[in-house]
Amino acid sequence: MYPLTQIALALVTLLSVTAASLFEKREFFSVMQVPNTKFVANGPAAYAKAFQKYNKPMPHDLAVATGNDGSVTATPVDAYDSEYLCPVSIDGQILALEFDSGSSDLWVFSTSLPLSQQKGHVIFDPSKSKNWKALSGYTWNITYGDKSGASGTVGTDVVTVGGTSVSGQAVEIATQVSSQFVSDTANNGLLGLAFSSINTVKPQKQKTFFDLAKPSLSSPVFTADLKHHAPGTYDFGTINSAKYTGAITYTNVVTSKGFWEFTGSGYAVGNGSFVSSSIDAIADTGTTLIYLPDAVVTAYYQQVSGASYDSSQGGYTFPCSATLPNLTLGIGSYRAVVPGQYINYSPRGSKCFGGVQSNTGIGFSIYGDVFLKSQFVIFDGSSTPRLGFASK
Ligand SMILES: O=C(c1ccc(-c2ccco2)nc1O)N(Cc1ccccn1)C1CC1
């Protein structure tokens, strides 16, 4: 064979081998493992992972050690305790949500919002969730008492709160939010804990996290242990006796409006005598202040020197140096005492704005955070829903 031919043959062979090696199915190859030097070992978390992987209940101590005991921290968003935010995982994306026992929609800031409304917020991106299932044609639209509101579309996903996971939870994606929510950049959405009857999703109402979690909870309850100027907790499925003192007083709940609605038994201002009177009220963790009948509000501020209704502020104000009396609110025979200092809500101009205001126009009273943070509160979602209150 001529050398030229040999060279050509060799070249063709070399090329064909090279080409083949590019396309051949490689039988095996090894990759060098590189240790993650930044990883900090966490034994309990590693141990808990095994239970979570196979969705098995983990031992109590391990649950407590790893924040999986159904307890979630509720952190005040500012120096006035105007709202409390809790970390919620949506298929691994963690957002700070406001737990609201006065509404029943779980909605989040999302990538579907105009960028101007997303600014400053932690955003949920459904495209990054492997368990996300869009509910085609479903919408939601909610308006709150302070005229704030939001609306959008819906899907379902896996939602985890304090180690309690729920699959198929309706997550309401905001496509529009009001200016109050845009400017509240710590708040990335709400988790409704009122009754599912007032969920706003159409064409089919959706269930709240609590309703979906109930069957997996040891007891169909959640508790609120909110604190004054400090983080507190919501617990799901258990009543932690270390968090309250004395006996729990239970009172019946009417669910016809979809709220945790009950009848208060009266009030006392400071060391004054208790006035028996039926007060139709709701327990609302999503409302900051206490809204009461005018008779109670005027009786209270009569005991605060320099207090007056300031129409320019839309409520009662008083000199910030004023000493505020305690407010006692009756629930059955139980006397819930709200410390006076909790009722100095915030400086407003040269005066301070009261944490107790009139319920005029609402149609019922609202026992909001100023009240709830003075108590340990049990939201009992059993077949006969009831509210429990205890001192702490
Ligand atoms: O903001 C709400 C509120 C919550 C949920 C709903 C709603 C409509 C449809 C489904 O839920 N509508 C509200 O209005 N407050 C508190 C409040 C504060 C001040 C004045 C009026 N009210 C409801 C719980 C009482």
Image (spheres, helix red, strand yellow):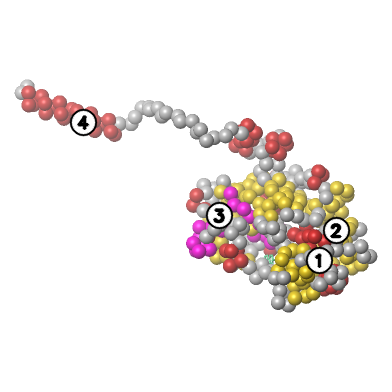
Above/below status of 125 relative to 146: above
Q: Amino acid at mark 2?
A: Val
Amino acid on which the number 1 mark rests in the picture = Ala
Instruction: Tell me which label, 3 or 2, sits earlier in the chain.
Output: 3
Residue at the spot 51% in from the left edge and 53% down from the top edge: 125
**Circle 4: residue type:** Ser
Label drawn at residue 16: 4
Mark 1 or mark 4: which comes first in sequence?
A: 4
Circle nearer the viewer, 2 or 1: 1
Kindly identify which residue carries mark 2. Answer: 337
State the separation of the CA atoms marked 1 and 3: 39 Å
Near-viewer residue (126 or 122): 122
The residue depicted at 66 percent of the width and 37 percent of the height is 56
- Please provide the residue range marked out in magenta: 94-117
**Label 3 vs 4, first from the N-terminus:** 4
- The disc, 2 or 1, on the residue closer to the chain's N-terminal end is 1
Spatial CA distance of label 4 from label 2 is 88 Å
Determine the image quadrant of residue 53. top right
Q: Secondary structure at mark 3?
A: loop
Name the residue that disc number 1 marks. Answer: 322
Figure quadrant of residue 61: top right
Considering the image in quadrants, where does the N terminus appear?
A: top left
**Which x, y percent locates residue 298?**
84, 73
Question: What mark, if any, has residue 122 been given in the picture?
Answer: 3
